[in-house]
Amino acid sequence: MSLIKSPMKSYFLLLVISITLITFACKKNKENPAPSNDYPSIIDEYIALNYAGFTTYNVELEAGREYEVTLCDGNILVFDLSGIFMRERLGGEPFGDPANCPDSLLTRADLALIIRVKNKAGNNVSSVKKGEEFTYEIIVSNAGPANASSVNVTSVFPVSNLEFIASDGFYDEFSSKWKVGAIAKGTSQKLVITAKGIEIGGTTLSAEVMQAEPKDSDSPHGNGILEEDDQYEVAIGITE
Ligand SMILES: [Ca+2]
């Protein structure tokens, strides 16, 4: 992303830098590093790779042993003296122009969804006999760093091929909605649906995270893109 695209933006950027330098007079600024304020370039490379869109941030040498990078959203990344990333932590107040500061990845959750089909013995299967009860599990996990809440999943129950028998969560086979609720970072929630095949042939089980708070770091909710990690499809055969 180019920092300076127009004279107007250039002027605005200078204004932001001026304010930033006043606010963080003791800090080094990525936009205007003095020679004595130099820091390892791999810090800039790390931010460009992991925090695309963050064009304003400050780098400060803390007690001569590590660099603290304050992102414009106020969150802080800590690097060692050679510029190797060590940890992140929630920081203070945001600064600068919000337009140069996208939603922080630190404040997002990363939800992922999979489906597992199992026979009565608990083994993973790709086909079942007509009339045979089986289960399919929809598992939503949250890799963090934020906790997720108000999670809702849609999984259309294929009524023409399967008979719904039971589920162990807040799932409504008529509306296709599973009200998941909260998923703390590092944990998962599972819905187990019991069904049986009523029509010989094949069908597809699918599910997607439709809503959740906060935003997901790599898969916008409810956009129907199967390649994303919050959506899943699995084919199942129903045999004689
Ligand atoms: Ca995700």
Image (cartoon, helix red, strand yellow):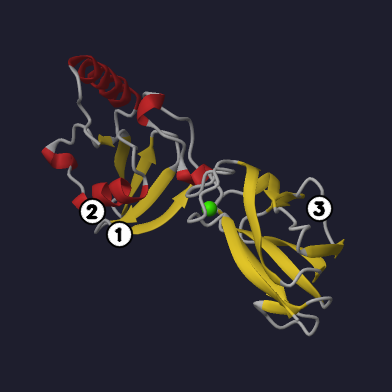
Q: In the image, is residue 230 above or below residue 32?
A: below
Residue with the most extreme right position: 165
- Residue 84 is tagged as 1
What residue did someone put label 3 on?
173
- Residue 42 is tagged as 2
Q: Is residue 145 left or right of residue 10?
A: right
User: Of the residues shown, which amino acid type is indicated by label 3?
Assistant: Glu
Q: How many labels were placed on the picture?
A: 3
Q: Position of residue 81 (x, y in %)?
A: 26, 57
Element marked by disc 3: loop
Q: Label 3, label 2: how many angstroms apart (C-alpha)?
A: 51 Å
Q: Position of residue 5 (x, y in %)?
A: 20, 24
Q: Is residue 50 left or right of residue 204?
A: left
Q: Position of residue 235 (x, y in %)?
A: 62, 68
Q: Is residue 91 left or right of residue 155?
A: left
**The N terminus sits in image quarter:** top left
Few, some or many residues within 10 Å of mark 2 (<14, 14–19, 20+) = some
Residue that appears at 28% across and 25% down: 21
Along the line of sight, the residue nearer the viewer: 104 or 208: 208
| Residues tagged 1 and 2 counted as in contact (Cβ below 8 A) | yes
Q: Point out the tag, 3 or 2, that comes first from the N-terminus.
A: 2
Q: In the image, is residue 28 above or below residue 116?
A: above
Few, some or many residues within 10 Å of mark 1 (<14, 14–19, 20+) = some
User: Of the residues shown, which amino acid type is indicated by label 2?
Assistant: Ile
Q: Point out the tag, 1 or 2, that comes first from the N-terminus.
A: 2
Q: Position of residue 217 (x, y in %)?
A: 49, 47
Element marked by disc 1: loop
Residue that appears at 18% across and 36% down: 33
Pair 3/2: label in front:
3
User: Of the residues shown, which amino acid type is indicated by label 1?
Assistant: Ile
